[in-house]
Image: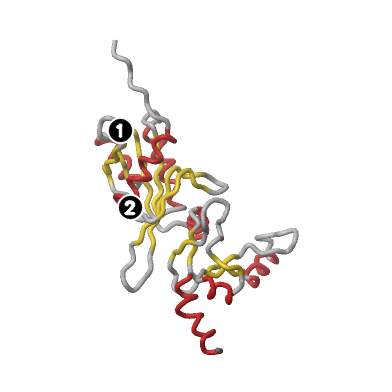
């Protein structure tokens, strides 16, 4: 009797999908098992989609399954991630393509489908475009150590590896940011105080969480001009 082929674990499939996102969608960043307090996503990618006149980034979430969970259940879980990302996909490990019924279910719900076959990913159905809730979308992007510039609105790298989420930005020190050619991180205290009074955000020591960023390019080519004029 032929031995039944062992299915890989979901975690073993994450790198397969991550590599596919980078290759197929040209994602400049892709994380594995990334999430917030409400849930974690299996694979999360960011790619540039803007033109020459506008910086626009598209986010993609992929829910990975090993082919053993009921299809409708997995599809519903995938759909929930549209609060985080612009496009949502269900990637399922299987030897045979998705059936017409499965494609019809996915199309009706509004999710994309990816067949994982061995070490290959095959896109069977494209995901519609969604507008996620901004606060969740930006929080998830920050998990990949990226932030949004308040001036040019581009997404740029704010971190430098593990435990250095803000390692690529100076903290409220413009001179340091200019000299070290880094971005700038500052806190919006007026918004923080407004939220505190409304009971929306509370800190025991009175600190604020309202962090904002300015990218290195804006620091170098805009703010540094003020320093040069003074000199």
User: In which quadrant of the rendered image does the N terminus lie?
Assistant: top left
- Residue drawn at the location 65% of the way across and 72% of the way down: 190
Mark 1 surroundings: few (<14), some (14-19) or many (≥20) residues within 10 A? few
Q: Which mark is residue 128?
A: 2
Rendered image quadrant of residue 130: bottom left
Are the residues at dot 2 and dot 1 in contact (C-beta closer than 8 Å)? no
- Residue drawn at the location 59% of the way across and 70% of the way down: 186
Q: Is residue 151 above or below residue 34?
A: below
- Residue drawn at the location 36% of the way across and 34% of the way down: 71
**Near-viewer residue (82 or 108):** 82
- Of mark 2 and mark 1, the one earlier in the sequence is 1
User: In which quadrant of the rendered image does the C terminus lie?
Assistant: bottom right
Residue receiving disc 1 = 118
Give left or right: position of 41 versus 110.
right
Which mark's residue is nearer the viewer, 2 or 1? 1
Q: Residue furthest right?
A: 205
Residue 177 placed where, x, y %? 55, 72
Label 2 element class: loop
Q: CA distance from mark 2 to mark 1?
A: 26 Å
**Near-viewer residue (162 or 120):** 162
Residue 156 placed where, x, y %? 45, 64
Label 1 element class: loop
Rendered image quadrant of residue 167: bottom right
**Near-viewer residue (197 or 87):** 87
């Amino acid at each position: 009797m032929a031995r039944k082929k062992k299915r890989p674990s979901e975690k073993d499939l994450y790198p397969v999908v991550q590599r596919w996102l980078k290759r197929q969608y040209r994602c400049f960043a892709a994380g594995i098992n990334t999430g917030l307090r409400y849930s974690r996503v299996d694979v999360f990618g960011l790619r540039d989609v803007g033109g020459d006149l506008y910086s626009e980034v598209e986010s993609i979430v992929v829910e990975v399954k090993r082919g053993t969970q009921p299809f409708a259940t997995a599809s519903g879980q995938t759909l929930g991630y549209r609060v985080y990302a612009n496009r949502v996909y269900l990637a399922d490990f299987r030897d045979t393509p998705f059936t017409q019924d499965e494609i019809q279910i996915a199309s009706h719900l509004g999710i994309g489908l990816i067949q994982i076959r061995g070490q290959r990913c095959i896109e069977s159905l494209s995901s519609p475009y969604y507008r996620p809730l901004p606060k969740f979308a930006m929080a998830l992007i920050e998990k990949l150590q990226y932030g949004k510039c308040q001036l040019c609105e581009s997404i740029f790298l704010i971190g430098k590896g593990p435990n250095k989420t803000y390692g690529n930005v100076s903290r409220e020190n413009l001179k340091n940011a200019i000299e070290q050619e880094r971005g700038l991180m500052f806190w919006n205290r007026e918004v923080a105080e407004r939220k505190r009074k409304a009971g929306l955000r509370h800190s025991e020591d009175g600190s604020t969480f309202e962090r904002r960023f300015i990218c290195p390019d804006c620091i170098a080519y805009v703010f540094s001009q003020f320093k040069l004029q003074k000199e």
